[in-house]
Image (cartoon, helix red, strand yellow):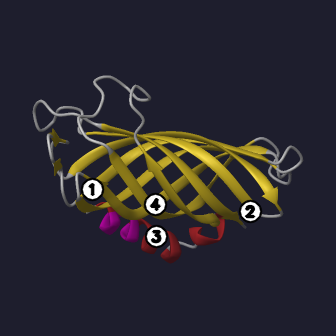
């Protein structure tokens, strides 16, 4: 459902000529785990791993001087991957929006955002995540090691905000490798 909405918005943007205002700014791979006492309470009952591919798109609104590579901008990020725990694997896809700051002189990239996710499986061993629809919050930092290649860390929180009743979210610490356009 999230992807249908994203595709619909993209088609409307191209039809109205807005597409030239949108730029794909990066693609990458991510992987991470939950760390005992390294997330929001209550902590997970199981150990989780998540692996995904992602892409970021800069939205046309930029704060700061547009010609400058240093600015604060709005971005859209989508991902697809696997969530694993207790010998079981489920599919996860996310769509988030947020703020990004990239300073090529300092070789840093900072971003944070909120959005939604869909998971194909939400019961892993002793932990019930709630249901297929999840809310996502994330924040991260990266360093450009070589030209256009960023290595970063991300804190990724996923929760159903109790819309399915009493359940637990999942907090992951993820490492990422991103190619920046």
Question: How many angstroms separate mark 1 from mark 3 (CA)?
Answer: 20 Å
Depth-wise, is mark 1 or mark 3 nearer the camera?
1
Q: Residues within 10 Å of mark 3 (few under 14, many from 20)?
A: some
Mark earlier in primary sequence (1, 2):
1
User: Disc 4 marks which residue?
Assistant: 78
Q: State the residue at coordinates (25%, 40%).
A: 46
**Helix, strand or loop at mark 4:** strand
Depth-wise, is mark 3 or mark 2 nearer the camera?
2
- Looking at the image, residue 111 sits to the left or right of residue 68; the answer is left
**Residue 148 pos. (x, y %):** 78, 64
Name of the residue lying farthest toward the left = 165
User: Disc 1 marks which residue?
Assistant: 118
The front one of 42 and 126 is 126
The front one of 27 and 63 is 27
For residue 10, the mark is 3
**Residue 160 pos. (x, y %):** 23, 39
Which stretch is magenta? 3-8
Depth-wise, is mark 1 or mark 2 nearer the camera?
2
**Helix, strand or loop at mark 1:** strand
The front one of 79 and 96 is 79
User: Disc 2 marks which residue?
Assistant: 149
């Amino acid at each position: 459902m999230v992807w249908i909405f994203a595709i619909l918005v993209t088609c409307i943007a191209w039809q109205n000529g807005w597409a030239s205002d949108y730029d794909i700014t990066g693609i990458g791979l991510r992987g991470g785990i939950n760390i005992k006492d390294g997330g929001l309470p209550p902590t997970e009952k199981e150990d989780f791993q998540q692996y995904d591919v992602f892409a970021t798109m800069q939205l046309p609104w930029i704060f700061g001087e547009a010609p400058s590579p240093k600015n604060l901008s709005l971005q859209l990020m989508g991902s697809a991957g696997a969530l694993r725990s207790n010998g079981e694997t489920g599919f996860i896809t996310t769509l988030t929006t947020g703020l990004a700051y990239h300073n090529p002189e300092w070789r840093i990239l900072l971003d944070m955002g909120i959005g939604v996710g869909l998971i194909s499986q939400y019961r892993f061993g002793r932990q019930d995540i709630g249901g297929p629809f999840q809310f996502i919050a994330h924040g991260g930092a990266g360093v450009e090691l070589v030209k256009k290649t960023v290595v970063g860390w991300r804190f990724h929180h996923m929760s159903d905000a109790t819309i399915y009743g009493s359940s637990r979210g999942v907090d992951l610490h993820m490492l990422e490798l991103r190619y920046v356009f």
